[in-house]
Image (cartoon, rainbow, N blue to C red):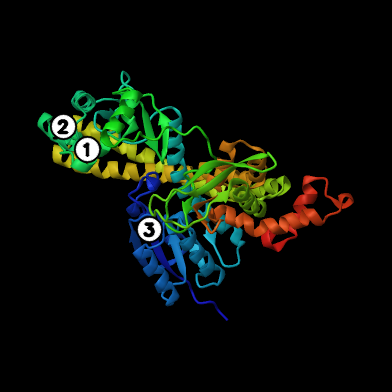
Amino acid sequence: MIAKPIRYFLYARKSSENEDKQVASVPSQIEELKKLAQQMNLNIVEIFTEEKSAKAPGRPVFSQMIEDIHKGRAEGIVCWKLDRLARNPIDGGTISWMLQQAIIRHIQTFQRGYHPTDNVLMMNLEFGMANQFILDLSVNTKRGQRAKIQDGWLPHKPPVGYVNNLYNQPDKPPIYPDPYSFPIMKKLWAILLETRCSLEKLFDTAQEMGLKMDRGVKISRNNFYRLFRNPFYYGSFLWNDEVYPGKHEPMIARTEFDLAQHIINGRSFPRAKTHVFAFTGLMRCGECGAFITAEEKTKHQKNGNTHHYTYYRCTRRIKRDCAEPPIRSDELEEQILNVLGKTTIPPQFKDWAIKQLKEEHSKEKIDRDDITQAHRHNLDACVKKLDALFNMRLNEEIGPEEYARKKDDLTKEKQKYEGLIADTQDRIETWLKRAEDMFTFAQTAQKRFEMGTLEDKRYVLSCLGSNLVLSGKQLRIQVDKTLALIQEVAPDVQSLHNRLEPAQVADSITDWEALYAQNKKWGG
């Protein structure tokens, strides 16, 4: 029976967010993919375009395309690369499953093709890397925030009286006093301390003095009241329910701040915590959604023994009567270790898997180099045309309007090829590194968690997954997509290593490779 020719949908997507700043534009993708389809004799029956992030499900154009494929209007997809189709595990799983079931018979990207008979591990890794990229954005942002906090700087806009050094002026720190509002706020603190007036009266005084927020916005009464609870003014700052020492110039002394709290309502601001806990700020309560905090408790037994315990519990900032029970840190760590145990792989498998990825990656290198060389040739031609056009204008061979029009066309073409080159190079430079990092983490995370510092434990848990929820003393983790792929094969790999008797254990890398290659799940 002769197979029916495949009909293709062309799908081009670019997000306006930072995640896609190096990706070719939608028109560039369409133009290049049309050329590719013509060269490969692919029948494109419809073009779908979308400018929306793929980090979460819910893209309307993508959903329509999937629905049309299910209805039999096409059997293939042409796209720039797989991360244009999905950067989240749900959409990625949909595409992967439809390909495995031959609902989609072929996916052709600019650099390779995918078929139902292929080893699905490679496609899943591609989707996993795309999803990991989105997670990395969040992780990198949080890492940058932690770095600022550790260095003594609030990773956010400061309160009234201070401004951020947005333009990195070399003679100013990251946060410095605002020449306009700093003197006013300092005077208001002095009035509060000297006259012991109410915040209501102080607010009226601030209005008379012309106190405003940045960009001249009038400050509300509630926001004004909150200013005088903020530890930032005595040289510290509040972040995720923790007070940290700051390096910015304080407006008042700590003793003055405490006195001001007594004046306002008779209570001092909570002092900075002296204990360091590994997992605060990472988990949320399963009942009310508030963050999980930690506290130490000491229990004295009748026999004279004393025991110290660390408990993780809901902060109850959202629901005061939240019934989520606390959990001891050792019980929580045991649950995390159970998850890590299901992900751990031996070093031999890590080395073999990375070798397989490199071999797969090298198969595409020649094609990628040819593609990049072609783009560079076209880019050089654009630059030469721009130079020639400039000389023509200098010699007055063309008028200003014609020059501007042709320059605009050539500039757009130049930018297109620069984007294509950057996009291709970005894939080459980052794909393998992410894969190696993923397998290295799977190999070392359990030992690092067991033997490492509190910071090591925190790092491992933050990398393990997202949506960490503590519910009924059970930690629920949405395991990272790429690690979930490893979890699928890790039990079989561990079983293979465990069942070999010492005398039978393979001694060489080649022997291990042969054993792995015999298993269809990860080697076939």
Residue at mark 1? 224
* Residue at the extreme front of the image, as rendered: 302
Residue 32, image x, y percentages: 39, 54
Along the polypeptide, which appears first: circle 3 or circle 2?
3
Along the polypeptide, which appears first: circle 2 or circle 1?
2
Using the image as rendered, state which of residue 34 and residue 322 is in the foreground: 322
- CB atoms at circles 2 and 1 under 8 Å apart? yes
Assign a secondary structure to mark 3: strand
C-alpha distance separating marks 2 and 1: 10 Å
What label sits on residue 211 in the rendered view? 2
Residue 519, image x, y percentages: 73, 61
* Residue at the extreme top of the image, as rendered: 171
C-alpha distance separating marks 1 and 3: 48 Å
- At label 3, which amino acid type do we have? Ala
Using the image as rendered, state which of residue 483 and residue 436 is in the foreground: 483
Residue at mark 3? 12
Assign a secondary structure to mark 1: helix
Residue 390, image x, y percentages: 24, 33
Mark 3 surroundings: few (<14), some (14-19) or many (≥20) residues within 10 A: many
Task: Kindly report which numbered mark, 3 or 2, lies closer to the viewer in this rendering.
Answer: 2
Residue for point 40% across, 44% down: 22
Residue for point 70% across, 58% down: 491
